[in-house]
Image (cartoon, rainbow, N blue to C red):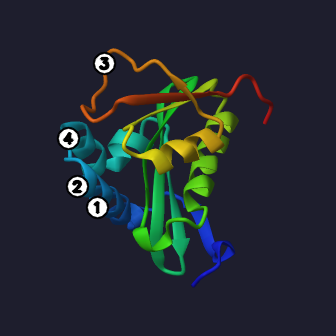
Amino acid sequence: MPTPDSITIVPFRPELAPAFTALNRAWIERLFALEPADWKVLQDPRAAILDPGGQIFFAVDGAEVVGTVAAVRESPTSFELAKMAVAPTHQGRGLGLRLGQAVVDLARHSGADLLFLLTNSRLGNAIRLYERLGFRHAPLPSHSEYTRADVYMELRLGRHDG
């Protein structure tokens, strides 16, 4: 079993894009159903996430991508943490925390004041992970692109140097 230290967190590279799609499709299709908003992001992550100023991070174990997460720029001062997935073979090793922290760091260094996410109440482990990252529950926005979203959380970053 690899140690967490042997797994690196890296930013987007074109050759890793198929893993972003595959990892997210696997968990979404297992627990829910893919929605139009999922397809938009998964079919063209460059246009949906990277071109507007976001980033996709990957957890890489040797040559294998075992986790991913997106930082979607919503405005000059806010990002959405989205599409986090860790391969079942690598869950429980702190990779979600490391991936989430990469998004927090990116948002903070980009001058954002707010990082938010939408999730589902059935995903208890994910919600606990987000709480460990400092996210707090807030009222669900009146409109979401995802019908499965019933939990809204945010992390107020405030003003930071760097």
Could you give the CA–CA distance between mark 4 and mark 1, rounded to whole angstroms?
14 Å
Which residue occupies 32% across, 57% down?
27
Quadrant of the rendered image containing residue 128: top right
Q: Amino acid at mark 4?
A: Glu
Q: 144 or 72, which lies in front?
A: 144
Which residue occupies 47% across, 63% down?
67
Residue under numbered circle 2: 29
Q: Amino acid at mark 3?
A: His
| Quarter occupied by the N terminus | bottom right
Residue under numbered circle 1: 26
Which element is circle 4 on? loop
Q: Are marks 2 and 1 in contact (CB under 8 Å)?
A: yes
Could you give the CA–CA distance between mark 1 and mark 3, rounded to whole angstroms?
26 Å
Q: Amino acid at mark 2?
A: Glu
Q: Amino acid at mark 1?
A: Ala
Residue under numbered circle 4: 35
Residue under numbered circle 3: 143
Could you give the CA–CA distance between mark 3 and mark 4, rounded to whole angstroms?
15 Å
